[in-house]
Amino acid sequence: MDLIRRSQYGLPATSQAAFIASTEGTSVHYLGSEYLSRRHDLCDDYVRAIRASHLANTTEGYVDIAYNAAVCEHGTVYEGRGANRRSGANGTAALNTRRYSVVALVAKAGGGLDHPTDAQLHGLRDAIEWLRAEGEAGDYIGGHRDGYATTCPGAPLYDWVKRGAPRPGSPPAPAPAVVDLSRLISAAHVDPPKSGTPVSYAGVRTVEAALRAEGLLSASLVDGHFGTSTIQAYAAWQRRLKYTGADADGIPGRTSLTRLGAAHGFTVID
């Protein structure tokens, strides 16, 4: 891993961003603006320029560069806010606390360098694993668009993210889990089964794992049974989506389940 610490490229050694002990994982970003390929000795200049523009943004009130790390086309990882520091790039206060952010120096479509290089993909993976090692980041890897209305990180990077963010040349990732909506709804209505035999199949465990990652369900309750606790957790997810009344009854519907799947890497079928 080619990691350049803050002090090595002219930033204060420690970010003023708030301390966080851990996150559920990492969100991947792109610049969303024009960006041209450049010599490697100019990349640190660009990262410093990003920080300067963020600090000058009085509307957002940034205390530092918004990202926890930035990765150039040559595969070098530049420490941004760094590990154990709250992100400023994910769109909401909740997402900034729950997920680190890593930006690839990649342009919007047609804006110059708009596809990540293989070296850059290796660097992004390095940054994700570094945040796991130093910042207690969880296994989640998503795009900025997962949980926030944006096109970031652009089609090429988002395709890579949804494939599990593999290193170039590595074997294809396993196919995403599939949740059968009809069986899940049936299971949710059995609360709990009077026979004492829990309803158990892959779809329920997949949804429970996503609810756990959202901080809505205890790990001890991820058991493949869509009982009272899971229904309560799912109702909390529906309320997080601004559903109310009968739409927040804890019984999965296609829209809420699809949005949960988009954020946590599973596919919904009828």
Image: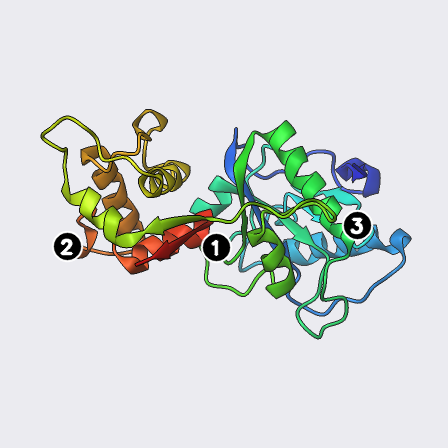
Residue 232 % position (x, y): 21, 39
- Label 2 or label 3, whichever lies nearer to me, is 3
Q: Name the kind of residue labelled 3 in the image.
A: Ala
Q: Name the kind of residue labelled 2 in the image.
A: Gly
Q: Earlier in the sequence, mark 2 or mark 3?
A: 3
Circles 3 and 1 in contact, beta carbons < 8 Å: no
- Neighbor class of circle 3 (other Cα within 10 Å; few <14, some 14-19, many 20+) is some
Q: Quick check: 41 left or right of 198?
A: right
Marks 3 and 1, how far apart at CA:
24 Å
Q: Earlier in the sequence, mark 2 or mark 1?
A: 1
> Quadrant where the N terminus lies?
top right
Residue 21 % position (x, y): 52, 28
Circles 2 and 3 in contact, beta carbons < 8 Å: no
Does dot 3 land on a helix, a strand or a loop? Answer: helix
* Residue underneath mark 3: 119
Viewer-nearest residue: 259 or 63? 259
Residue 29 % position (x, y): 61, 55
Does dot 1 land on a helix, a strand or a loop? Answer: loop
Q: On residue 245, which mark appears?
A: 2
- Label 3 or label 1, whichever lies nearer to me, is 3
Q: Quick check: 128 left or right of 262?
A: right
Q: Earlier in the sequence, mark 3 or mark 1?
A: 3
Q: Quick check: 200 left or right of 131?
A: left
Q: Name the kind of residue labelled 1 in the image.
A: Asp
Viewer-nearest residue: 254 or 96? 254
Residue 252 in view, yes or no: no
Q: Residue at x 71, y 61 (%)?
A: 106
Marks 2 and 3, how far apart at CA:
50 Å
* Residue underneath mark 1: 146
